[in-house]
């Protein structure tokens, strides 16, 4: 029986643990220095922009498509196993645009999606006003509606993945820190192998190690002299409350525009975000309250009825962005035969978690990577 050790239990690590728990003859241990969903995952808005993304081919599109399809079966599967309710908005994503928008680009994308078996609808202002009266139609010239894209609660999802994985026999060690890895390099092929993970709770033998530690992946790989450079990018968001839902209470899609998301989470509550704040030269990121205020004002400009809302809380989180290469990093660690990387998802960790889990499962079960 092969023993897989997964380091990191955000949404990506939890998704990998659950997916692998469905494979026979695998023993799985998950390690995280804190409780699950406490880092990037806990700060995410859970907007799954797959069909509405401009990725149309290659791995970037395939991963999105795989994830969007898997979520349709994964959510009810997890709810049945755990008895937990995972908030899952099936009412799609509405992307607003102004006069400078490239309408032809959207028409072309809609045609591509149609050929791929997906739907995108272009709405003029009359249709937008009829269906979403909360949108300020004086500033918006049209919209694209993606009925098959989704939004979910990342923390609820991650906790359900962990519970379902444990139900299937996965061992989870939270509050445990990885101190290092035992490696051997045979003389013949010079490819190293890791036989165990050293932790604050002792040594754990491993046939496979999956590094899904987000920003924590950099120090882990540095210990192995194969440093993967992942930098933090800060995001801030708001949780607001209105006495009644925006527009039609029976139609509450995610509304997005100019990289600002208005996310309905039930009743008159919404999440609004998120900022994109890069570190200074000192690698330090201080919360920029002005940037959050700009996001809030942009949301109000789209939907003026947001103006009287009560701000219940604000929060922030650090997203893991690979330096000098595309996100995410899903591959074998160079120089090591049994260490796999599933990290650096930047702003798409929740969206791509199922496809990442699928890729890691394939690497482990087939031996191809």
Image: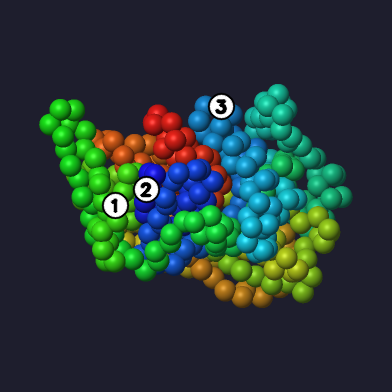
- Residue 359, position as x, y percentages in the image: 48, 37
Q: Is residue 238 left or right of residue 41?
A: right
Badge 3 local density, few (<14 within 10 Å), some, or many (20+)? Answer: few
Q: Is residue 116 left or right of residue 336?
A: right
Marks 2/3: CA–CA distance = 35 Å
**SS for callout 1:** strand
Which image quadrant is residue 112 in? top right
Q: Relative to the observer, which residue lies in front, 163 or 233?
A: 163
- Residue 262, position as x, y percentages in the image: 66, 58
For the residues bearing labels 1 and 2, Cβ distance under 8 angstroms: yes
**SS for callout 3:** loop
Q: Quadrant of the C terminus?
A: top left
**Which mark is nearer the camera, 2 or 3?**
2
**Residue at image point 34% right, 36% down:** 332
Residue 357 visible somewhere in the drawing:
no
Q: Which mark is residue 3?
A: 2
Badge 2 local density, few (<14 within 10 Å), some, or many (20+)? Answer: some
**Residue at image point 58% right, 67% down:** 238
């Amino acid at each position: 029986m092969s023993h897989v050790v997964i380091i990191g239990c955000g949404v990506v690590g939890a998704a990998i643990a659950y997916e692998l728990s469905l494979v026979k003859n695998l023993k799985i241990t998950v390690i995280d220095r804190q409780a699950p969903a406490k880092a990037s995952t806990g700060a995410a808005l859970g907007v799954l922009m797959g069909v509405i993304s401009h990725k149309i081919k290659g791995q970037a599109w395939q991963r999105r498509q795989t994830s969007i399809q898997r979520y349709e079966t994964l959510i009810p599967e997890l709810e049945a196993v755990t008895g937990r309710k995972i908030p899952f908005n099936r009412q799609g994503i509405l992307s607003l645009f102004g006069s400078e928008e490239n309408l032809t680009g959207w028409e072309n994308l809609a045609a591509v999606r149609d050929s791929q078996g997906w739907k995108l609808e272009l709405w003029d202002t009359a249709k937008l006003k009829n269906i979403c009266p909360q949108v300020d139609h004086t500033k918006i010239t049209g919209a694209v509606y993606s009925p098959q894209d989704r939004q979910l609660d990342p923390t609820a999802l991650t906790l359900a993945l962990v519970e379902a994985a444990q139900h299937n026999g996965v061992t989870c060690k939270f509050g445990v820190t990885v101190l290092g890895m035992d490696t051997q390099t045979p003389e013949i092929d010079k490819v190293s192998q890791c036989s165990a993970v050293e932790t604050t709770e002792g040594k754990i033998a491993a046939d496979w190690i999956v590094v899904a530690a987000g920003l924590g992946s950099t120090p882990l790989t540095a210990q192995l002299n194969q440093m993967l450079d992942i930098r933090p990018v800060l995001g801030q968001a708001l949780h607001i409350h209105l006495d009644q839902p925006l527009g039609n209470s029976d139609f509450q899609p995610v509304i997005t525009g100019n990289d600002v998301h208005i996310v309905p989470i039930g009743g008159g509550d919404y999440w609004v975000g998120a900022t994109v704040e890069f570190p200074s030269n000192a690698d330090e990121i201080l919360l920029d309250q002005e940037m959050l205020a700009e996001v809030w004002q942009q949301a109000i400009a789209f939907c003026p009825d947001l103006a009287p809302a009560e701000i219940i809380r604000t929060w922030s989180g650090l997203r893991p962005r690979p330096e000098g290469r595309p996100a995410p990093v899903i591959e074998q660690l160079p120089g090591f035969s049994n260490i796999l990387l599933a990290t650096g998802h930047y702003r798409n960790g929740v969206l791509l978690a199922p496809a990442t889990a699928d890729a890691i499962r394939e690497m482990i079960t087939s031996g191809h990577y």
